[in-house]
């Protein structure tokens, strides 16, 4: 679980987008620093998975949208 390191920041427009990207980047960098090699995004959509892949291409990032995706991912990650 990641927490928001920029919770006190109140911004709009470009500044808000930059703050969101910084939060995602710092979270991904923290995961890598802890030794993570795989990241799974559970739920609909693939936005976070795409961002993770752009931030660190060495991570195996997967979008897990349903039970079928989950089962495939578990088999491949064993």
Image (spheres, rainbow, N blue to C red):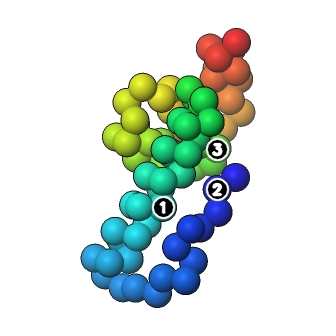
**Secondary structure found at label 1:** helix
Where does residue 51 sit, x and y in percent of width and height? 40, 47
Q: Which mark is residue 68?
A: none
Q: Can residue 68 be seen in this view?
A: no
Which residue is painted at 50% across and 45% down in the image?
A: 28
Quadrant of the image occupied by residue 30: top right
Where does residue 26 sit, x and y in percent of width and height? 48, 53
Sequence-first tag of 3 and 1: 1
Residue at the spot of label 2: 2
Quadrant of the image occupied by residue 11: bottom left
**Secondary structure found at label 3:** strand
Which residue is painted at 35% across and 70% down in the image?
A: 17
Where does residue 55 sit, x and y in percent of width and height? 37, 42
Residue 25 sits above or below residue 19 on the image: above
Sequence-first tag of 3 and 2: 2
Residue at the spot of label 1: 23
User: Are circles 2 and 1 on residues that touch, CB within 8 Å?
Assistant: yes
Front-lying residue, 52 or 75 = 52
Answer few, some or many: residues within 10 Å of disc 2's Cα (few below 14, many 20 plus, some between 14 and 19).
few
Which residue is painted at 43% across and 66% down in the image?
A: 20
> Is 32 left or right of 53, judged from the image as shown?
right
Distance from the alpha carbon under mark 3 to that under mark 2 = 14 Å
> Is 56 left or right of 62, judged from the image as shown?
left
User: Are circles 3 and 1 on residues that touch, CB within 8 Å?
Assistant: no
């Amino acid at each position: 679980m990641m927490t928001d390191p920029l919770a006190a920041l109140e911004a709009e427009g470009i500044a808000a987008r930059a703050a969101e990207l910084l939060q995602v980047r710092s979270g991904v960098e923290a995961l890598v620093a802890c030794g993570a090699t795989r990241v799974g995004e559970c739920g609909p959509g693939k936005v976070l998975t795409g961002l993770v892949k752009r931030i660190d291409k060495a991570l195996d990032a997967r979008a897990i949208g349903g039970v079928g995706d989950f089962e495939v991912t578990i088999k491949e990650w064993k």
